[in-house]
Image (cartoon, rainbow, N blue to C red):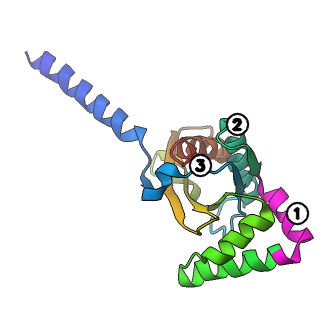
């Protein structure tokens, strides 16, 4: 009898852990997002890197853009490199983007006029802002862990509205060989992308 109860207990714990690991840590969808079907999307550069590990902004940006292309949710994905090229070639786009992001950061205001203008100039329907919240290896006693956490925000350029915001982290235990943080990042990104409007 005790053995059967123990087996049931283990199964319940396993199921609960599996269910707990299936979703994102945070996932917020605007009510209008159910009808939001962007076809052309751009990935904006990561602005800040506050981590002790090697600055891997470019790697993360490439992982996100590559994952979006691989999922085939959008007909056109403008990666950071191509967006920077457009900005370099268009003084107007640079000014609009800078003014928009300044207002967003300082006032937490997504200016709909600037957003719309940016969409017209860059030929996009939506854009993604990225934040890498954790990018590290830690060790506490004998426990060694690798962790990557990210936040993504998707904005509709026609309205400037935040349509989707999500946060997720993956922590991987290891003994001798450190898991590569970019590989963990790819798993984080792939999981997050499934939840974004498309």
Write the residue at 74% across / 49% down: 77
Using residue 148 as the reference point, say whether residue 49 is left or right of it: right
Please state which of residues 105 and 60 is positioned toward the viewer in this rendering: 105
> What is the crowding at mark 3: few (fewer than 14 residues within 10 Å), some, or many (at least 20)?
some
Examine the structure image and report whether residue 84 is included in the region drawn in magenta: yes
Rendering coords of residue 2 (x, y %): 9, 19
> What residue is disc 2 on?
70
Q: Residue furthest right?
A: 89
* Relative side of 31 to 151, left or right: left
Q: Which residue is the site of mark 3?
A: 37
Residue 153 is situated, as x and y percent measured from the top left of the image, at: 56, 60
In the rendered structure, which segment of residues is drawn in magenta? Answer: 78-92
Secondary structure of the residue carrying numbered label 3: loop
Residue 29 visible: no
Circle 2 SS class: helix
Residue in the picture at 88% in, 72% down: 90
For the image shown, how many numbered marks are present on the structure? 3
Whether pointer 2 and pointer 3 mark residues with C-beta atoms closer than 8 Å, the reply is: no
Tell me the quarter of the picture where residue 86 sits: bottom right
Measured in 3D between alpha carbons, the distance from the residue under mark 1 to the one under mark 3, in whole angstroms, is 26 Å
Viewer-nearest residue: 76 or 170: 76
Q: Quadrant of residue 56?
A: bottom right
Q: Main secondary structure of the magenta part?
A: helix
Q: Residue at x 54, y 46 (%)?
A: 192
Question: How many other residues sit within 10 Å of disc 2, few (<14), some (14-19) or many (≥20)?
Answer: few
Say the numbered circle drawn on residue 85: 1
């Amino acid at each position: 009898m005790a053995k059967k109860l123990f087996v049931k207990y283990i199964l319940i714990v396993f199921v609960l852990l599996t269910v707990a690991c299936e979703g994102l840590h945070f996932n917020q969808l605007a009510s209008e997002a159910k009808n939001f079907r962007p076809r052309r999307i751009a990935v904006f550069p990561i602005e800040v890197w506050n981590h002790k590990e090697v600055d891997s902004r470019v790697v993360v940006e490439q992982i996100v853009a590559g994952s979006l292309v691989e999922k085939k949710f959008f007909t056109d994905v403008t990666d950071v490199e191509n967006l920077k090229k457009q900005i370099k070639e268009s003084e107007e786009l640079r000014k609009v983007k800078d003014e928009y992001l300044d207002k967003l950061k300082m006032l937490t205001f997504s200016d709909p006029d600037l957003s719309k203008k940016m969409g017209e100039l860059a030929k996009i329907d939506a854009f993604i802002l990225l934040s890498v919240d954790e990018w590290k290896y830690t060790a506490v006693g004998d426990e060694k862990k690798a962790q990557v956490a990210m936040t993504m925000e998707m904005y509709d350029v026609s309205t400037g509205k935040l349509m989707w915001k999500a946060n997720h982290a993956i922590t991987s235990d290891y003994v001798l060989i450190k898991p590569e943080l970019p590989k963990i990042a790819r798993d984080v990104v792939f999981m997050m992308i499934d939840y974004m409007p498309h």
